Amino acid sequence: MFNSYCLIFNCLITFITLQNVEGSVSFPKDFIFGVATSAYQIEGAWNESEKSESNWDYKTHFYPENVNDHSNGDIACDSYHQIDEDLKIIRELGVQSYRFSIAWTRILPDGFSNRVNEDGIRYYNKLIDGLLRYNITPSVTIYHWDHPQSLQEMGGWTNTLMIDLFADYARIAFEYFGDRVKHWITFNEPDLFCSDIKRGTVFSDGFGRYLCAYIMLKAHAKTYHIYKNEYYIKQKGKIGITYSSTWHEPKTNSTEDIAAAKRALEFELGLFANAIFSKDGDFPKIVKERVAFMSARQNFSKSRLPELTSEEIKTIHGTADFFGINHYTSDLVSDPSWESFEVSYDVDVHVDRGVDPSWPGSESGWLRDVPWGLHHLLVYIKDTYNNPIVYITENGFSQFELQDDGRVNYFKGYLESVANAIAEGCNVLGYYAWSLMDNFEWNAGYTHHFGLYHVNFSDPNRARTPRRSAFWYKDFITDQKS
Ligand SMILES: *[C@@H]1O[C@H](CO)[C@@H](O)[C@H](O)[C@H]1NC(C)=O
Ligand SMILES: *[C@@H]1O[C@H](CO)[C@@H](O)[C@H](O)[C@H]1NC(C)=O
Ligand SMILES: *[C@@H]1O[C@H](CO)[C@@H](O)[C@H](O)[C@H]1NC(C)=O
Ligand SMILES: *[C@@H]1O[C@H](CO)[C@@H](O)[C@H](O)[C@H]1NC(C)=O
């Protein structure tokens, strides 16, 4: 599988790393190690065989200045044409599972479910069958930020029509792929796509994010019930949702800072997770009280946070078989001295954020290597949400060099944190490294490199080359499974 250079390199790395790994960290026998990507970030072929324009196609084409290097995902890693190459490198890593997402615009170009694009279906079928042939479990995200631009023009995730349209789209995914896909994720990181409603307007900051949370929760719950009522009996799969959260550590042990850190977690994670996973459902009490208080001070007739009816609370509660979490880094949160009554999400959250400068940095300004943060976050999820089944659906570090020692250290530390959390009773069943290969990193374009594999974006073939971390991860998994 590897060329001879790689084989020699691999041996060297094995020799070096096993001594650090062996004995120090141990995962349960059936723990799943995986690797993740998403459609817009890797597929390219943005306008091929009937695929329609997505919100990300539109944004990057018409507002390139919002992307660091003014790039887009038109070609990306060219994965639409390189299934065999992708399957080869996934296999090389020795992972048990591959997490990828479906492009709504590729299988339902009109956004509606009345017309299915067979070429899109063929692409995902070939990928799924290729994975299963090698005993690699597909974990499929139905929505990873890209939807038809035609629906964006109707307001996207602030239009309640999205609830039914999304559920119809998900139904097509179950219909066509559910015989083989047993691990579904409805949404990836609602906190992030809901923060991207329409930047810089009062609507976005003070209303849009909350409205998006409400609509997303209803779309998720509807989809979950469709799966359980109509597909589960035959398909017997699991369906969950993936959040993102930074770990917010109180900067000091003062009551105020501890409350500020809790507030940051409730606004980032709780806003989307509480209604599904908490004991009583609904939006978190802290968020409801804070937004209601601010809205009243701002002379609104009611809270800017939509109120869930008791019927909605019941319908949304418990609608997930697992809790997916994407986690990258931590910060230090304190209670601010400033006061403001501006209509804005950040004012609602009302915290100051900082970092410890001794935490090792990455290629991305926002990402530092703080392995204990993941341990704290997993214990927080266990305690706050009644110890759900957890999959870490993304975790990774950005570094360009092929000798990516920073990334290897990061993975070592974070995996050890996961093992410690499991030893303390956290119900974590899997871990997916982000990412299989360098890709279009949203507003960072191609300037931040998260790949276990380097991708040459000047090469028409988009050649993939393993970094040191690819060998390290492979050896780590082999060691855990032997
Ligand atoms: C697809 O987009 C490319 C630019 O990325 C353009 O050159 C090409 O003509 C388009 N193809 C179709 C079929 O529209
Ligand atoms: C806060 O208290 C905890 C537990 O006593 C301790 O581990 C931690 O270091 C303290 N943090 C700070 C910033 O003093
Ligand atoms: C809300 O109304 C009160 C009473 O009329 C007024 O004093 C205050 O300035 C208003 N607040 C805002 C944010 O407009
Ligand atoms: C990337 O691809 C280009 C074009 O094929 C080639 O000239 C260049 O040497 C490659 N770069 C690396 C680092 O392999």
Image: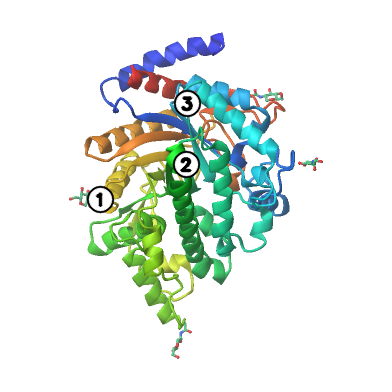
Q: Amino acid at mark 3?
A: Ile
| Rendered image: mark on residue 383 | 1
Q: 387 left or right of 45?
A: left
Tell me where residue 210 appears, x and y as whole percent.
47, 65
Q: Quick one: label 2 or label 1, which is nearer the N terminus?
A: 2
The answer for how far apart the CA atoms under marks 3 and 1 are is 32 Å
Residue shown at 34% from the left, 17% from the top: 18
Q: How many marks?
A: 3
The answer for how far apart the CA atoms under marks 2 and 3 are is 15 Å
Residue shown at 30% from the left, 28% from the top: 27
Residue shown at 32% from the left, 38% from the top: 428
| Rendered image: mark on residue 146 | none
Can you tell me which quadrant of the image ligand 1 is in? top right
Count neighbours of disc 1 (C-alpha within 10 A) and say few if under 14, some if 14 to 19, many if 20 or more. Answer: few
Q: Amino acid at mark 1?
A: Asp
Residue shown at 28% from the left, 49% from the top: 380
Depth order, front residue of 278/300: 278
Depth order, front residue of 106/41: 106
Up-down relation of residue 255 to residue 88 (above or below): below
| Rendered image: mark on residue 136 | 3
Q: Amino acid at mark 2?
A: Trp
Q: Is the C-beta separation of discs 2 and 3 under 8 Å?
A: no
Q: Quick one: label 3 or label 1, which is nearer the N terminus?
A: 3
In this rendering, the label closer to the viewer, 3 or 1: 3
Q: Quick one: label 2 or label 3, which is nearer the N terminus?
A: 3
Q: 174 left or right of 23?
A: right
Report the residue marked by disc 2.
184
Tell me where residue 441 appears, x and y as whole percent.
57, 42
Colour scheme = rainbow
Tell me where residue 140 appears, x and y as whole percent.
51, 39
The answer for how far apart the CA atoms under marks 2 and 1 are is 25 Å
Count neighbours of disc 3 (C-alpha within 10 A) and say few if under 14, some if 14 to 19, many if 20 or more. Answer: many
